[in-house]
Image (cartoon, grey):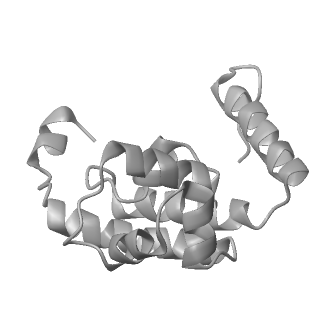
Amino acid sequence: MTPQAEAAVPMDPEQILAEFGQQLRHAREARGLSRQRLAERCGLSAATIKKLEAGGAFHPRLETMVRLADGLGVSLLDLVRCIDPRLSADERGRAGSVHVWLAGLDTASKELVLALVRVLARGATSSSVPAET
């Protein structure tokens, strides 16, 4: 997306928070966590998790977002990437579905997948690998 196109994307905070709430619920459920269990992992209350999942009316602080990312086992960037309105719907969808899929893996499998992705990403930028046709 060009810088001009990025600037044209509306950034409605209420809509973004509503989408964040849905994605948070999906991420929590994909990990098999109840609201109470996620709250314990994050150091937040179950009521806060419920408000965040409802979206819109509750504006989380940065500290809350950091705690959520930690509790879900993702980076802060990954936590919000799937709701970034400057990304295409397809890019946001891929970001969300990848996290759901990765969440189901054990730690060793997750590390293996991430290592493979890093190798493939380096290979994709290498001119020594011929493109498949």
* Residue at point 49%, 75% (across, down): 25
Left or right of 65, for residue 19: left
Count numbered badges in the picture: 0
Q: Quadrant of residue 13?
A: bottom left
* Residue at point 44%, 71% (across, down): 49
Q: Residue furthest right?
A: 108
Left or right of 118, for residue 116: right
* On-image quarter of the N terminus: top left
In x, y percent, where is residue 103?
70, 63
In x, y percent, where is residue 3?
19, 33
Foreground residue, 34 or 4? Answer: 34
Left or right of 102, for residue 70: left
Foreground residue, 36 or 23? Answer: 36
Foreground residue, 34 or 116? Answer: 34
In x, y percent, where is residue 91?
43, 56
* Residue at point 12%, 41% (across, down): 7
In x, y percent, where is residue 105?
81, 62
Does residue 7 sit above or below 14 in this rendering? above
Does residue 25 sit above or below 86 in this rendering? below
Left or right of 114, for residue 108: right
Q: Quadrant of residue 30?
A: bottom right
* Residue at point 74%, 36% (across, down): 120
